[in-house]
Image (tube, helix red, strand yellow):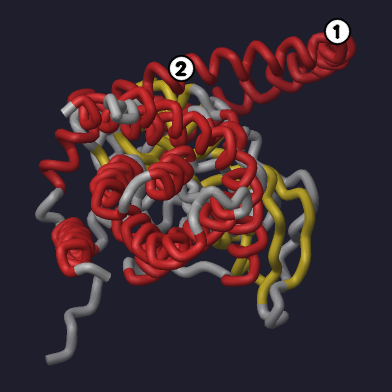
Amino acid sequence: MTIYAVGIPLFMIAAVIDSSVFSHLRYLNGQPSLVLVLVVAWGLLNELPDSLPWAFIGGLFVDLLSVTPTGTSSLAYVLALTILAFYVGQIGWRNILIPPLAVIFTTVLYQVVVLTMLIVQGNSFPVFRTILTWTIPSLVFNTLLILPMFRLMGRILDFLRPPKVGLV
Amino acid sequence: MQSPRSFTVVMTLGLCIILILLSLVGTLAPAEGILRIPLTALEGIFGGATTDFTIFAEEMAEFRSLRLRNRELEKALAQYQSELADLRAFRSDYDRLVELSNYVGQKGSDWRYVTTDVIGRDVNGVVRTIHIAAGTRNGVQVGDPVVTELGLVGRVVDVSATGAEVLLITDVNSSVTARVQNETRESGLVRGSISGDLILDFVNINGQLAENQQVFTSGETQAFPPNILVGQISSVGISPNSLFKQATVQSLVDFENLDIVLVITNFEPVDLQIFEEPEQP
């Protein structure tokens, strides 16, 4: 229960920070996405069934502050974590390259899902310029953000779920 | 994959797809409106603090150049004051002529404004929208035009009880019918672009566009009221198909650092449906 008492406000505030604070850091059309980075960090530090609810809840908060239909970001995050769990499970997340690679993959997948949904809604975007002005800056921001957030999330999880000890 | 794990994944994906479908058809709108209330309140707190900090940092950085700029502005002010005196004389003549000809139209002074803070932006970089701290409780409705003292900002596309989402005119899917303030009063369409620039398009190829000419809303499609400043022309060119003139329009509004906007809450578009041709059976 403690995990939900911390997790829900955490993702709620992260979504608000994305929309009201990180939007001021926007370069071209890209900006850091704290929710996405936290979802990836949480996903790498937990088993898939434990991390999916957070991908879902984090995505819901993002969609409530966006023009995309509710559920779009959740779908992207859940898909990303499922694929990551399959591949990262074989390598192990302790490899230093895994968190940056995971966040790059999730950012790209998220943007593909969001653009698809916006096109379904009748919007149109020039593909090449969108990649240049949205995808590339977002990848740089999120890659820079993942390592400190990964450590922070590790500390939070240690606090919420201290390792069990016993007498041998 | 183990089967309980696969079951959780399939259930979560299914739930996401159901939510998307319900959101697309609008069934979730009331729930979304309620859930947005705490988020809008938090956005107001974070957005206000961030804006204050940004303004403070920018002001400190610009402090040295402000004194020089102040001198330039004092000179410009003296010049504009004399121009203003002339324009007031013209305005007085215009008002008298309007009364004499019994002209029926919408005037800027007729508008009722709601002044509100900008509290956030859309997190998707390709969509240029802002979140404002006024909603249906303040009389804001979908379609209301949003302006600042420097010109047109956009229009409300989504609204909850305490907040609203505004599609900026710089968004790639936004378009505004406009008129250039020159002798020939050329009309065209100002549309946003992925880079955030404003493009004036579909202007008559023989139109006499020039730099620094001002562009105003024409009000032709009734999406926006007429005579709101959109910006001024910064460069002129020809459209790729060589059929129209095209111009880049520089808005005076700084869309990246908007902090306060005005929503026009009593704009009622003229109903043009009566002039539309009925569909053929």
| The N terminus of chain B sits in image quarter | bottom left
Quadrant housing residue A148: top right
The correct choice, above or below, for A71 with respect to A54 in the image is below
Q: Considering the numbered disc 1 on the image, is that residue within a helix, a strand or a loop?
A: helix
Judging depth in this view, the residue of B170 and A55 nearest the camera is A55
Mark 1, Cα crowd under 10 Å, few <14 / some 14-19 / many 20+, is: few
| The C terminus of chain B sits in image quarter | bottom left
Residue topped by disc 1: B67
Judging depth in this view, the residue of B207 and B47 nearest the camera is B47
User: From this viewpoint, which residue is outermost toward the front?
Assistant: A168
Q: Amino acid at mark 2?
A: Gly
Q: Which of the labelled discs sits on residue A136, or is there none?
A: none
Where residue B274 sits in the image (x, y, percent)?
19, 66
Q: Considering the numbered disc 2 on the image, is that residue within a helix, a strand or a loop?
A: helix
Give the residue at x 77% y 44%: B212
Query: Could you tell me if residue B274 is visible in this image?
Result: no
Determine whether, in the image, residue A45 is placed left or right of residue B217: left
Chain of the residue under the numbered disc 2 shown in the image: B
Q: Amino acid at mark 1?
A: Arg
Q: Nearer the viewer, mark 1 or mark 2?
A: 2
Looking at the image, is mark 1 or mark 2 earlier in the sequence?
2
Quadrant housing residue B136: top left
Mark 2, Cα crowd under 10 Å, few <14 / some 14-19 / many 20+, is: some
Where residue A151 sits in the image (x, y, percent)?
52, 33
Dots 1 and 2 on the same chain: yes
The correct choice, above or below, for B203 with respect to B141 in the image is below
Residue topped by disc 2: B48
Give the residue at x 81% y 15%: B73
Residue at mark 1 to residue at mark 2: CA–CA distance: 28 Å
Chain of the residue under the numbered disc 1 shown in the image: B
